[in-house]
Each structure stands twice: as C-alpha cells, then as structure tokens.
Image: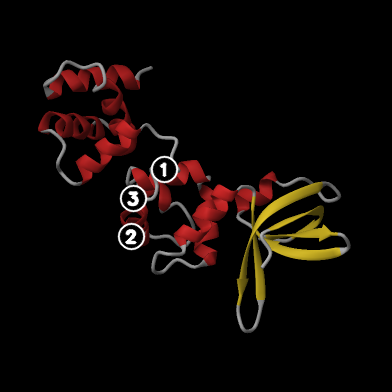
Amino acid sequence: MIGKLKGIVDSYGEDFVILDVQGVGYVVHCSARTLQRLPKPGEPADLAIETHVREDMIRLYGFRSDAEREWFRLLQTVQGVGSKVALAVLSVLEPGALATALATGDKGAIARAPGVGPRLAARLAAELKDKAPSFSPADPALIALTGAVEERTAPQPVADAISALVNLGYPQIQASAAIATVLKSAPEGAEAKTLIRLGLRELAK
C-alpha cells in the first residue's frame, strides 16, 4: 500500500495530477482544492496517499494533509458516499470548515458540493457530527449551542433570539455564533430581547 508520494509534478488532468517519482509517473486523483494548491509542472510536491485496490484497478487519491485524508475516509463511512462524492465535498470545504459545518449542522454548506443534495447533507451531518468537534476550529460553545437548538433543548430565550436573528435575514450558523458569543458575557437568565440586542451588536462588528 502507498501512504505517501514525493516527487516532481509532471502534468495535470481534470481531476488528477501525474507525479513523477524517480522516473515513474503516478496518476493521483485529488480534490479541486488540493489540485489548485499544488505547484506548477516541474516543481516538487508531496502528497499523503489513500490507495484503493479493486479486482480491476488500483487508484491513488492524494491529499495535502493527513487531516484531509482522514476526512476522505470518514465521509465514505456514510451510506451513499463514495470516493467521487467525498472528493467533491473536500473540493468546496477544507477540513476545518467541513468539521465546523458538520459539528454545527450547517447542511447548506455541505450541500454546496456537486452530487450532495439536502437529504445526503442531512445524513452526513447526523452521522458525522460526533466525530467533527475534535477536528473543528470552531468555538466549542457554538457547537454545543447549535446542537441544543437542533435538539430543541436550548433555553427558550436563546432559541427565540436565534430565531429572531434568522428572521431578520442572518444565516442560522451566523446567528448561532453571535448568540454563543454574547452568552459568555450576558447576564444569567437574560431575556430574548436582551440577547437579540447584544447579538445584533455582535453581528455589526
């Protein structure tokens, strides 16, 4: 099994790079985001590799980081997600952003990937949300709050404040992030109208 390749970029295809390693050209399939960040032909590059072996072929997938490769594996544990869809997701969301989207249930961000509809995005968020926080740079308070809102266990003033901000046109994740921030300094037991006012102030920064 190949776990890493280090060589010279030979050429690019639509969804792959040919990496010359001591005279052997390896065809390595990558996400669009990874391909965009690789150097031009003739320059050195190294990629973490995931090797898929089947009866009729061996296919290599390349990643700029071990974290990206780990998400490629995790995404495929969800029913309906193969290597093509996993690469599509990683083409629109880098690992940290993907982890945050999953942890906070931001299904809209996940559904931006080609081939991922609302139903599959919801399944990804539901099945991988417990694994996402350890990979996410997001504030744990935000992750906890969005989970509470999703499960309808958030205090009513908090849920009402987020709902009010969403009704004013702010995206759910942005509204949740603002309320999560103000809750750290808001008086205990603050009413919804207070949280809304503080949330708007936070969003205006």
Circle 1 residue? 134
- Callout in the foreground (2, 3): 3
Above or below, 107 relative to 202: below
Residue 170: in sight, yes or no? no
The residue labelled by disc 2 is: 123
Tell which of 160 and 129 is nearer to you: 129
Q: Residue at image x 24%, y 30%?
A: 165
Q: Label 3: which residue?
A: 130
> Residue 157, how many percent across, how many down?
12, 29
Callout 1: 10 Å neighbours few (<14), some, many (20+)? few
How far is mark 2 from mark 1, CA to CA? 19 Å
Looking at the rendered structure, the kind of residue marked 3 is: Asp
Q: Quadrant of residue 14?
A: bottom right
Query: Which quarter shows the C terminus?
Result: top left
Secondary structure beneath label 3? loop
Q: Residues within 10 Å of mark 2 (few under 14, many from 20)?
A: some
Q: Secondary structure at mark 1?
A: loop
Is 162 left, or right, of 192 in this rendering? right
* Residue in front for this viewpoint, 13 or 61: 61
Is the residue marked by circle 3 packed among few (<14), some (14-19), or many (20+) residues within 10 Å?
few
- The reply to whether the C-beta atoms of the residues labelled 3 and 1 are less than 8 Å apart is no
Q: Amino acid at mark 1?
A: Ser
SS type, badge 2: helix
Quarter of the figure that contains the N terminus = bottom right
Whichever of labels 2 and 3 marks the residue nearer the N terminus, that label is: 2
Compare residues 35 and 126 and report the one nearer the observer: 126
Say if 101 sits above or below 50 in the image.
above
